[in-house]
Image: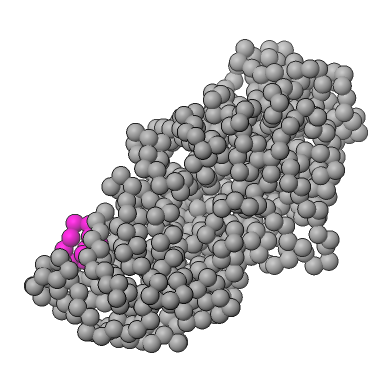
């Protein structure tokens, strides 16, 4: 639906030159596919688009895609309310009865329902006056009262859950503008009205059943709701369609979902890294209750949910924060840096972390997902762009990261907070640094993908793979998240691993073989393992926000899906014989660059049922009678052999028998044994029974 109240043009005073995310390594640009029978929407300009013609184009797009139930959220605003947008004189005040004339004494920011009404409180330090208009006042403005803090607030009787509203702000220089609430908990769309949400109204059904897994037992699945379960040409997918596939994740062995950003963004199709309303779930995916239902259903299946949040920039389009109170300082105003620190790879909209009100705004957003949506953790996007600005250390950004982690640890110590930093900075996960629980690790993904995608076996560097396996931040295995595919690694000029390996034959022998090697290394190396959606059934090509997963591949590559399932079960020690894969300890004891073989020992406390040996053949030759070191004597049973034809009919089915260990040192280990067969491009995992 369109916004009830037209938005005014952006004031000419702004000099922003923001560009959308399209060209940098971590680009997360929204891309809208052309649907059959529907004209392609206008391309977004490479500058911050607050202009009326762009808004009209985006509103027209929203009308085409918005679900029917969202169109029925309330009657159209009366013409008298809609006409307020362009006025330069003070709007007339409402004659609502019982409206107080003093600021609210109730706590909270944004629209906070109470029994019989709603408290509205908004930060507008440079505004002369602030009013609120909505369904509750027949869209006639109600005057908010100034507080010494720079906030304006009022308790408004009769305003309640589901009603729409906007602020009417008289700026520093006397001009009036209609503005969405930067703290809106729901919106009709990214250029529409804010909506009051009573979070207490939702009835959780299964939440009490769930307990977040320990970090060393977590297996993460990165999900993009819009493409996870949808049909090409329609969509995007939504939280209900995602619920329909949660049983697949449960069967796979996943116990944590990491959702790509799902706060309200411009238009309907996006990666989500362009948040317009950080507190409002994306309207194209459903309502706030739909998101809560998704979390509740995930918890029912023993799966935690981590929300990806974006604090390194806002927008850059459709942001209500821009020039909110009439003072831009030559840039975007009170919410943003207004010097060179404003500049980010995605626009001049880096929040001003030096202002306590802005830090509070972002910290409150983080806590909202954990409190009101019962999320089990957060993943903060591009934290390097928070702790740095223009390549220089930004202490104010470091302080924001510390504040968020301190708040989470104080109230929710069991919840997982992950940084996507990719700067190889140990301080990100150090208790005396930013204090994150874990961070995405480029030290693993890049050398492992290089080895897997090399054209020739001779180009595979086993020493680089060994370093990738053994790396830790601050001596802790769980301080890193490891993966071979993520949304960044399968787009921006790169493709899914099967396509990188197999080219046109992305479902062929080499693609399948090396996909399993990548999965095996991810599930057996120290760290918190993560898959990207569809990886488990050999999804190919590159990730696009308008291209849904091809679920038919789950049937076509059922064996690959089974291989991933088996590896995840081993990682989680489901059969009580590979506990070492959850341990802190690793020893890459065998590196053979001639035959392209690597072997490593994983253990927690050590001994039968714990010590685990992983042997990986990165070469195309089957090896026989292969000698390697072992931690002890005894029978080392084969728990996994990726050359099994049950995983793919064109695999060699090289039978690897149990290995008899005997005392006698090899590879720096006290015992040794001989593996009778090691298939080409294969992984064998060994352990002893308890």
Residue drawn at (46%, 29%) of the image: 395
Residue drawn at (85%, 30%) of the image: 85
**Res 302 seen here:** no
Image x and y of residue 525, in percent? 33, 61
Does 647 sit above or below residue 435? below
**Res 35 seen here:** yes
Does 596 sit above or below residue 71? below
Residue drawn at (83%, 25%) of the image: 140
Residue farthest left in this picture: 663
Q: Is residue 609 magenta?
A: yes
654 sits to left or right of 343: left
Boundaries of the magenta span? 601-612
Q: Quadrant of residue 389?
A: top right
Q: Is residue 366 magenta?
A: no
Q: For this rendering, which residue is in front, 505 or 568?
A: 505
Q: For this rendering, which residue is in front, 84 or 287?
A: 84
391 sits to left or right of 634: right
Does 628 sit above or below residue 103? below
Quarter of the picture holding the C terminus: bottom left
Colour pattern of the rendering: one colour
Q: For this rendering, which residue is in front, 105 or 56?
A: 56
Image x and y of residue 480, in percent? 38, 51
Image x and y of residue 398, in percent? 46, 32
Q: Look at the magenta stretch and give its main secondary structure.
A: loop
Q: Quadrant of residue 612?
A: bottom left
Residue drawn at (39%, 58%) of the image: 444
Q: Quadrant of residue 614?
A: bottom left
Image x and y of residue 469, in percent? 33, 60
Q: For this rendering, which residue is in front, 255 or 512?
A: 512
């Amino acid at each position: 639906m369109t916004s009830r109240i037209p938005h005014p043009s952006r004031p000419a005073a702004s000099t922003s030159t923001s560009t959308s995310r399209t060209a940098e390594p971590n680009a997360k640009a929204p891309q809208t596919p052309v649907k059959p029978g529907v004209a392609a929407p206008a391309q977004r300009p490479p500058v911050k688009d607050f202009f009326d013609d762009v808004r009209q184009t985006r509103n027209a797009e929203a009308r085409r895609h918005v679900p029917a139930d969202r169109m029925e959220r309330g009657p159209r605003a009366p013409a008298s309310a809609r006409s307020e947008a362009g006025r330069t004189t003070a709007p007339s005040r409402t004659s609502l009865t019982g409206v107080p004339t003093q600021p609210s004494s109730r706590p909270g920011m944004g629209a906070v329902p109470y029994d019989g009404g709603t408290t509205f409180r908004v930060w507008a330090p440079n505004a002369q006056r602030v009013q609120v208009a909505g369904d509750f006042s027949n869209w006639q403005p109600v005057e908010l009262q100034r507080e010494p803090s720079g906030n304006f607030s009022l308790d408004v009787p009769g305003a309640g859950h589901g009603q729409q509203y906007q602020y009417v702000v008289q700026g520093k220089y006397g001009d009036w503008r209609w503005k969405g609430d930067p703290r809106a908990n729901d919106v009709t769309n990214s250029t529409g009205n804010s909506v009051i949400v009573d979070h207490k109204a939702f009835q959780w059904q299964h939440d009490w059943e769930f307990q977040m897994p320990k970090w060393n037992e977590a297996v993460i699945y990165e999900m993009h709701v819009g493409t996870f379960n949808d049909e090409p040409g329609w969509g995007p997918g939504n939280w209900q369609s995602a619920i329909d596939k949660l049983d697949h994740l449960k069967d796979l062995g996943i116990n944590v979902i990491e959702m790509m950003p799902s706060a309200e963004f411009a238009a309907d199709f996006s990666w989500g890294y362009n948040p317009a309303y950080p507190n409002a779930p994306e309207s194209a995916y459903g309502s706030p209750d739909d998101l809560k239902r998704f979390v509740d259903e995930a918890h029912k299946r023993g799966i935690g949910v981590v929300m990806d949040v974006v604090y390194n920039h806002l927008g850059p389009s459709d942001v209500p924060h821009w020039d909110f109170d009439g003072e831009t300082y030559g840039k975007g105003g009170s919410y943003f840096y207004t010097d060179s620190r404003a500049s980010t790879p995605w626009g001049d909209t880096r929040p001003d972390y030096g202002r306590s009100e802005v830090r509070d705004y972002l910290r409150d957003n983080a806590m909202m997902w954990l409190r009101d949506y019962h999320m089990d953790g957060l993943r903060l996007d591009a934290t390097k762009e928070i702790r740095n600005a223009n390549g220089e250390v930004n202490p104010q950004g470091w302080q924001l990261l510390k504040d968020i982690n301190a708040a989470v640890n104080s109230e929710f110590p069991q919840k997982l907070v992950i940084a996507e930093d990719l700067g190889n900075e140990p301080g990100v996960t150090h208790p005396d640094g930013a204090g994150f629980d874990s961070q995405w690790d480029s030290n693993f993904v890049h050398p492992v993908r290089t080895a897997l995608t090399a054209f020739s076996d001779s180009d595979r560097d086993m020493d680089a793979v060994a370093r990738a396996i053994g790396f830790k931040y601050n001596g802790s295995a769980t301080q890193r998240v490891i993966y071979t595919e993520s949304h960044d690694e399968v787009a921006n000029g790169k493709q899914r691993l099967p396509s990188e390996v197999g080219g046109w034959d992305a479902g062929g022998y080499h693609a399948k073989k090396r996909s399993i090697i990548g999965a095996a290394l991810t599930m057996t190396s120290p760290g918190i393992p993560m898959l990207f959606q569809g990886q488990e059934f050999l999804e190919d090509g590159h990730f696009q926000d308008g291209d849904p997963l091809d679920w038919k591949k789950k049937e076509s590559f059922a064996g690959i899906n089974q291989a991933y399932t088996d590896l995840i079960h081993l990682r989680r020690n489901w059969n009580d014989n590979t506990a070492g894969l959850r341990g802190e300890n690793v020893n890459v004891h065998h590196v053979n660059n001639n035959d392209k073989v690597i072997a490593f020992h994983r253990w927690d406390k050590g001994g039968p049922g714990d010590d685990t040996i992983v042997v990986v053949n990165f070469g195309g030759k089957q090896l026989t009678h292969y000698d390697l070191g072992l931690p002890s004597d005894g029978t080392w049973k084969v728990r996994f052999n990726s050359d099994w034809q049950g995983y793919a009919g064109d695999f060699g089915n090289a039978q690897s028998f149990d290995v008899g260990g005997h005392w006698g040192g090899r590879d720096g280990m006290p015992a040794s044994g001989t593996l009778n067969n090691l298939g080409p491009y294969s992984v064998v995992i060994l352990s002893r029974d308890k």
